[in-house]
Image (tube, coloured by chain):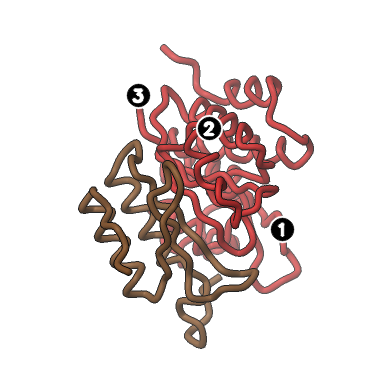
Amino acid sequence: MARDRHPKKELEAVVEYAEEQGWEVSAGKRHAKFRLRCPHHDRDGCQVSVWSTPADVDDHAKDVRRSINRYPHKNEGGEDEEV
Amino acid sequence: MKKFEFAIIASGLNPEDEEFADRFYEAGCADATLSYQKGVIIVEFNRKAVSFSQAIISACQNVRATGAKIERVEPDHLVSLAEMSDRSPVTKQALSLYSEGKRGDGFPNPSACVTTRHPLWDWSEVAEWLYKHDKLALDDLVQARIVKEANVYLECNEVADDNFTRKLEALEPALA
């Protein structure tokens, strides 16, 4: 079944970006419109919440995207993180 | 009011709980992005406040109201050369020369992981040095001191209380 769309286009774009990266999108309860879960479902699995009405849509969109990009298994097998 | 970006790292709540995210929103974290990564809760704020200390204090109160335990505030005060370079206009190469004493004078010694290939510095000490050498703004130095104080306090105390508030506020430059 198709999921709801986020009414804020900036946040809908980030949710679509998460889906492209293989993240699972599920509906939240009250204030969290969506719960995004990374493809690595174990103890190290990541999740990010997307609010229905954040204090600032642009800040929230930027930070959700940053969280997705920080996903530790994103570059698995790739180069080591620089220390 | 200015907007301050920082993160609070917390633990003690189950991210699989249905109410997990709503608790944070209802506790006043609508200006934060909530994630769970590497086994910890990360609450990244974009908080409007009169000062950095007030932003940190109010955010800690909000996170604590969810029932979570606050572990620390980030950007952490322990930093690598690469991270120092990200936080200042100075290149990693220049920082490396300063740290080896090949350029400049009196650069702080590393504070942690000193016996490893990648030691860590105390950002508040480095910020102090960079500020004295006109390579960092006063605001950045004040924020470095406040984060350090917050993390030292949180390491030794169960919760952020009135004493925490006083200690952080004391680090703000006097308001004109």
Residue at figure coordinates x 56%, y 45% from the top left = B19
Q: Where is residue B123 shown, x and y percent of the image?
A: 58, 48
A11 over B59 or under it: above or below? below
Q: Name the residue under label 1.
A: B112
> Neighbour class for label 1 at 10 Å: few (<14), some, many (≥20)?
some
**Callout 2: residue from which chain?**
B
Q: Residue B1 carries which label?
A: 3
Pointers 2 and 3 within a single chain: yes
Q: Mark 2 points at which residue?
A: B27
Could you say whether the residue bearing mark 3 is in a helix, strand or loop?
loop
Seen in the image, is B97 located left or right of residue B48? right
- Depth check, mark 1 against mark 2: the one in front is 2
Residue at figure coordinates x 51%, y 88% from the top left = A77
**Callout 1: residue from which chain?**
B
B126 over B37 or under it: above or below? above
Seen in the image, is B134 located left or right of residue B105? left
